[in-house]
Image (cartoon, helix red, strand yellow):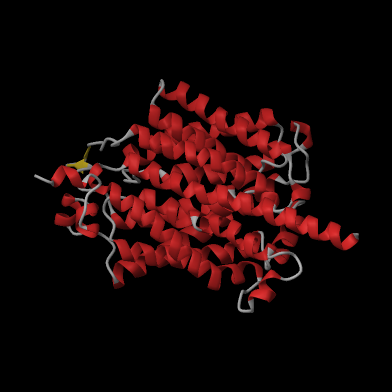
């Protein structure tokens, strides 16, 4: 009887995590269509191929190198050994956490769109998914977490808390993207003689589709971060929902119904709530998401018009800065005095969030500086003018338009 119950429990956990993995895998279609809807028509094919290729390469490097670095588990054994006594739970856990790792190149892709060479960025994504991200993951969630988390607990009163990756995934991706965007420089025509010439998005329905796909998949991203049936929490689902709609409402009001900000506002809310989704009150989640949306609205304008950083999808403020806000907000609204479950420390959340920024910026500048020097990173002027679809893939998004 005990054996049958254990087998059923193992099977349930495998199914639970596999469904979560599929939901988060679907989010990569959201990344693709969000980029397709934002870039110009001459770069839409590139966005689709780039996201799919980054996903595929990330799968290989995370399977061979990244997951072993993060969790000390390798897959160099027989199929029978891989299945083991728990119906192959470790394999679906790899699949689920791969979906997080592959978010890193997908996030970066949106910032560097429309002027990047294909294979150098694939190489950078492989380094991040196979080495850079897994090592940081190991420090917070994985095999090397004990020493750092014990230090946070002993020094600041509690371990660093990031339930579903506001910092580990989103902040990491957004801050890794910043060096790439800076080293690439702006797209042709973005600023002329110091004057800003905003490049309009190409397709609002595609942008909205990308946002909706991401939002739906996000409930797998957050809720299934429990990684087993015993850990599932309705609080995570409710908080994710309230943060998302908070992001939408705050963005719509702040921008007077701008559709691009409305749909990115939903994502801002979801990014912000990841870290504390398992411990804050739903009212707090609504506010965390709403403030995240305001960070994006004003952060994007500040990035583009004051700092003159041509971050096409605004991935630095959206994922980087809001991911940092998510980590810090868990250390504010997680306290029992504000309706949370407690067990967090503001100082630990602040320190862990700042540590991620430093780690991402240093490693990002190292990797991209080497790529610029060794391989070159930017398309030539003629290639950029023609568009990456024709320059790289030899076909546009609407091939019929070129048939006479």
Quadrant containing the C terminus in the rendered view: top left
Please tell me whether residue 260 is drawn above or below residue 357 in the rendered image: above
In x, y percent, where is residue 109? 38, 53
Q: Nearer the viewer, residue 331 or 23?
A: 23
In x, y percent, where is residue 188? 20, 48
Query: Image point 62% across, 74% down: which residue?
Result: 74
Quadrant containing the N terminus in the rendered view: bottom right
Query: Image point 24% across, 54% down: which residue?
Result: 388
Query: Image point 56% across, 47% down: which residue?
Result: 23
In x, y percent, where is residue 227? 69, 53
Please tell me whether residue 194 is drawn above or below residue 116 in the rendered image: above
Q: Nearer the viewer, residue 129 or 86?
A: 86
| Residue 125 in sight from this viewpoint | yes
Task: Using residue 85 as the reference point, say whether residue 398 is left or right of it.
Answer: left
Q: Residue furthest bottom?
A: 77
Please tell me whether residue 162 is drawn above or below residue 136 in the rendered image: above
| Residue 271 in sight from this viewpoint | no
Q: Residue furthest left?
A: 404
Q: Nearer the viewer, residue 250 or 8?
A: 8
Query: Image point 55% across, 46% down: which residue?
Result: 324
Name the image quarter holding residue 49.
bottom left
Task: Using residue 242 as the reference point, say whether residue 129 is left or right of it.
Answer: left
Name the image quarter holding residue 193.
top left
Please tell me whether residue 269 is drawn above or below residue 122 in the rendered image: above
In x, y percent, where is residue 149? 71, 59
Number of marks drawn: 0
Task: Using residue 63 as the reference point, say whether residue 44 is left or right of it.
Answer: left
């Amino acid at each position: 009887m005990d054996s049958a119950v254990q087998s059923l429990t193992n099977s349930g956990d495998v199914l639970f995590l596999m469904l979560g993995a599929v939901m988060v895998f679907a989010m990569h279609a959201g990344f693709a269509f969000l980029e397709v809807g934002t870039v110009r028509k001459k770069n839409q094919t590139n966005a689709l191929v780039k996201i799919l290729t980054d996903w595929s390469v990330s799968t290989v490097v995370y399977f061979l190198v990244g997951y072993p670095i993060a969790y000390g588990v390798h897959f160099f054994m027989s199929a029978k050994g891989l299945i083991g006594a728990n119906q192959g739970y470790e394999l679906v856990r790899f699949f689920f956490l791969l979906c997080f790792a592959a978010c890193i190149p997908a996030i970066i892709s949106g910032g560097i769109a429309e002027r990047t060479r294909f294979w150098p960025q694939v190489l950078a994504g492989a380094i991040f998914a196979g080495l850079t991200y897994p090592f940081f993951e190991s420090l917070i969630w994985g095999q090397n977490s004990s020493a750092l988390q014990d230090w946070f607990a002993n020094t600041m009163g509690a371990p660093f808390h990031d339930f579903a990756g506001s910092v580990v995934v989103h902040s990491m991706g957004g801050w890794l993207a910043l060096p790439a965007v800076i080293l690439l420089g702006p797209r042709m025509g973005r600023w002329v003689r110091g004057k800003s010439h905003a490049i309009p998005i190409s397709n609002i329905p595609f942008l909205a589709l990308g946002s909706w796909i991401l939002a739906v998949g996000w409930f797998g991203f957050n809720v299934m971060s429990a990684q087993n049936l015993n850990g599932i929490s309705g609080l995570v689902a409710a908080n994710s929902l309230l943060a998302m709609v908070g992001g939408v409402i705050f963005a719509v009001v702040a921008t007077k119904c701008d559709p691009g900000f409305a749909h990115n506002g939903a994502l801002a809310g979801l990014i912000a709530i990841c870290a504390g989704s398992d411990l804050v009150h739903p009212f707090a989640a609504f506010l965390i998401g709403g403030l995240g949306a305001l960070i994006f609205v004003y952060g994007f304008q500040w990035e583009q018009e004051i700092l003159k950083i041509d971050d096409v999808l605004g991935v630095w403020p959206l994922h980087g800065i809001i991911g940092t806000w998510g980590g810090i907000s868990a250390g504010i609204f997680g306290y029992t005095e504000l309706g949370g479950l407690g067990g967090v420390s503001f100082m630990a959340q602040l320190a862990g969030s700042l540590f991620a920024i430093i780690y991402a910026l240093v490693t990002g500048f190292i990797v991209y500086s080497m790529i610029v020097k060794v391989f070159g990173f930017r398309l030539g002027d003629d290639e950029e003018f023609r568009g990456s679809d024709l320059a790289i893939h030899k076909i546009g998004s609407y091939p019929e338009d070129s048939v006479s």
